[in-house]
Amino acid sequence: MTNLLPEMAEIWQQTLNWQPTVQQQAQFQRLYELILEGNRQLNLTRITDPQEFWEKHLWDSLRGIVPLLSANFSSASPAIIDIGTGAGFPGVPVAITVPNCTITLLDSTRKKITFLDNILSELALTNAKTLVGRAEEIGQHPQHRQAYDIALIRAVGAASVCAEYTLPLLKQRGLAIIYRGNWTEDETTALQNAVNQLGGVIESIEKFTTPLSHSIRHCLYLRKVANTPDNFPRAVGIATQKSL
Ligand code: SAH
């Protein structure tokens, strides 16, 4: 028996003012099946129930970025990078939903990237490409540094680490979106200093609940307002060991 993803058209409409087309729904379904299959070989995700997959992987991935794309990027083709994409979240749902963006899916684990290459070809997603590497190295690479309009990062590390991975990759005025569960004001205060050192500002922090299980989520939006000093990101592992 195949696992069928719910459609949730009304919830999409109410929460994101958007609904998947028939083709996008088919791509979501195929993505889900390929991840269930891939889970047998690779440890991709603990979330396998169809409702939970819909909420925690599809809806959660899109909630942080889709509202802002319709407001600011409707005619442009933003260059997006998803850092530590793992099994492709939030990047693959974004590639499916926002066909006019180009998205780079970065992960340090080659096996996950090989898996994603197959996903992209199965879903015929021509606006996404993969990259094997560490955020610390890619952030110093001339081809990638200051090259992106938006950097996404979910479940990769502490917020200051996420700031150090994302901000160097952004163009001036680019936006980093850090996906979090719980978040406190004290954490905002602590993050401020790291973000300043990296040439960014905390533009906004949004709190919301997921539509099925009502779990708490936060998205932190960091705007790049100045050049990131050349020494950031620091060498592999330093951001996590000596956080800013
Ligand atoms: N973003 C996905 C996966 C989170 S797991 C999701 O939310 O489901 C964290 C992933 O980040 C792992 O796949 C790991 O290989 C990758 N990762 C951790 N540190 C990294 C680094 N410095 N550079 C690139 N990828 C990294």
Image (cartoon, grey):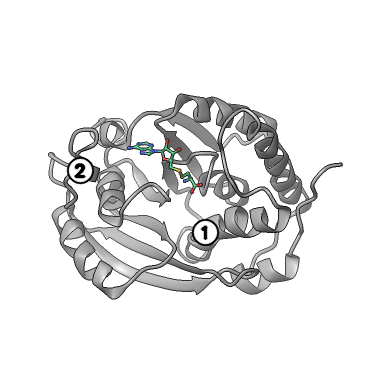
Residue 241 numbered mark, or none: 2
Question: Ligand 1 closer than 8 Å to the CB at disc 1?
Answer: no
Quarter of the image with the N terminus in it: top right
Residue drawn at point x = 59 percent, y = 46 percent: 46
- Residue type at mark 1: give it: Ser
Q: Residue 96: give x, y in percent of width and height.
A: 62, 46
Residue drawn at point x = 17 percent, y = 49 percent: 227
Q: Ligand 1 quadrant? A: top left
User: Dot 2 surroundings within 10 Å: few (below 14), some, or many (20 or more)?
Assistant: few
Question: Ligand 1 closer than 8 Å to the CB at disc 2?
Answer: no
**In the figure, residue 214 lies in which quadrant?**
bottom right
Task: State the residue in front, 44 or 235.
Answer: 44
User: Dot 1 surroundings within 10 Å: few (below 14), some, or many (20 or more)?
Assistant: few
Q: Residue 217: give x, y in percent of width and height.
A: 47, 67
Q: Earlier in the sequence, mark 2 or mark 1?
A: 1
Task: State the residue in front, 76 or 70.
Answer: 70
**In the figure, residue 19 lies in which quadrant?**
bottom right
- Residue type at mark 2: give it: Gln
Query: In the image, 98: left or right of 241?
Result: right
Query: In the image, 26: left or right of 229?
Result: right
Q: Secondary structure at mark 1?
A: loop
Residue drawn at point x = 38 percent, y = 57 percent: 178
Q: Secondary structure at mark 2?
A: helix
The mark closer to the camera, 2 or 1, is 2
In the figure, 141 relative to 8: above or below? above
In the figure, 6 relative to 109: above or below? below
Task: State the residue in front, 181 or 82.
Answer: 181
How many discs mark residues in the rendered view?
A: 2
Q: Residue 29: give x, y in percent of width and height.
A: 74, 46
Residue picked out by circle 1? 74
